[in-house]
Image (cartoon, helix red, strand yellow):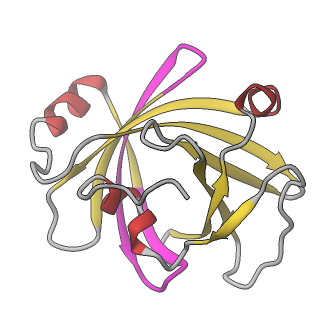
Amino acid sequence: MPPYEIERKYLIQRPDLLNLSTLCRVKEICQTYLPTAEGSLRVRRTEERGTVSYVETAKRSVSTLRRIEIERELTEEEYERRLAARDPRRQTIRKTRYCLPYGNHIFEIDIYPFWTKQAVMEVELKEENEEFSFPPFIKVIREVSEDPRYSNHAMAREIPPEDE
């Protein structure tokens, strides 16, 4: 069986980051897309508490919420070589990710430098119709799982949607 990722994505009001950082693991992420014929292929540099890791990820959509996702760890040298083959039509996406445990889920809140009022929050699920509840201090603007403008792949190529 292929390695599936099932996630829902929400546009949220930007939370209080000082309060959020006390509840979460915080990661600094730089992700760069590589040319590919289908789906998306990216390399990512993640720094958390002074430790840096490098990962290459290939994704291909199966449905709106379900994707096949294949990841492999890279050395720093492999990462640098992959960067040299970057997709020239896409910019590197930089974001701060707050990993918030709530209930039986981990909510990933991505803060981008180009927005001041909003953020994107994702929750990974075991099934597409799995129920969950939002942390009470998170203000959801709307679900954007089916809106391609809010994918990192699209935001790396186009001007991101305006703050709402």
Residue drawn where x is 22% and y is 44% of the image? 91
Quadrant in the picture for residue 85: top left
Q: Is residue 154 above or below residue 101?
A: below
Question: Residue 29 location in percent, x, y?
Answer: 45, 34
Question: Residue 38 location in percent, x, y?
Answer: 22, 74
Residue 67 sits inside the magenta stretch: yes
Front-most of residues 155 and 105 = 155
Q: Residue furthest top?
A: 50
Residue drawn where x is 46% and y is 76% of the image? 147
Residue drawn where x is 31% and y is 28% of the image? 75
Left or right, 146 with respect to 70, comes to: right
Front-most of residues 54 and 134 = 134
Left or right, 133 with respect to 149, comes to: right
Which quadrant is home to the C terminus? bottom right
Residue drawn where x is 36% and y is 56% of the image? 160
Question: Residue 98 location in percent, x, y?
Answer: 66, 38
Kindly report the secondary structure that dominates the magenta region of the rendered protein: strand
Residue 45 sits inside the magenta stretch: no
Boundaries of the magenta span: 47-70
Left or right, 111 with respect to 25, comes to: left
Quadrant in the picture for residue 78: top left
